[in-house]
Image (cartoon, helix red, strand yellow):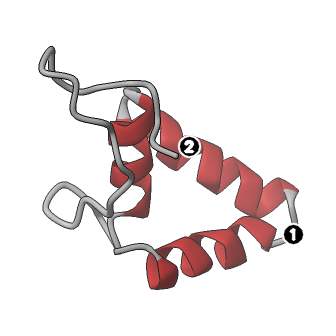
Amino acid sequence: MSPLRTNDPGGSPVKFHLDKHNGKLMGVCAGLANYFRVDPMVVRLIFVAGFFLGFGSFALLYLGIGLLAD
């Protein structure tokens, strides 16, 4: 199954990847921002808020994505 969204008018499917070039630590937030087409700062703020409000569960989520993706 491929995503229905495309980056270009040619129709190639969008795939999640770590954006290590634009990322700060592992490129997880920048990759998620590229995938969902939002500003990377918004994703970073969500992860920081989730880290403090979720008692560190977002840190495990971030680490899991960073180790398993790409």
| Residue at the (29%, 64%) spot, across then down | 24
In front here: 14 or 68? 14
> What whole-number distance in Å separates the C-alpha atoms at marks 2 and 1?
15 Å
Q: How crowded is the residue under tag 2: few (<14 C-alpha within 10 Å), some, or many (20+)? A: few
Compared to 21, does 35 lie above or below? above
Residue under numbered circle 1: 55
* Element type at mark 1: loop
Q: How crowded is the residue under tag 1: few (<14 C-alpha within 10 Å), some, or many (20+)? A: few
- Using the rendered view, name the quadrant where residue 34 is placed: top left
| Residue at the (13%, 62%) spot, across then down | 21
Q: Where is residue 28 in the image (x, y as percent from the top left)?
A: 42, 62
Q: In this view, does 35 lie to the left or right of 56?
A: left
In front here: 8 or 52? 8
| Residue at the (85%, 54%) spot, across then down | 53
- Using the rendered view, name the quadrant where residue 41 is placed: top left
Compared to 17, does 70 lie above or below? below
Q: Where is residue 6 in the image (x, y as percent from the top left)?
A: 30, 25
Residue under numbered circle 2: 45
Q: Is residue 38 left or right of residue 44?
A: left
The disc, 2 or 1, on the residue closer to the chain's N-terminal end is 2
| Residue at the (21%, 67%) spot, across then down | 20
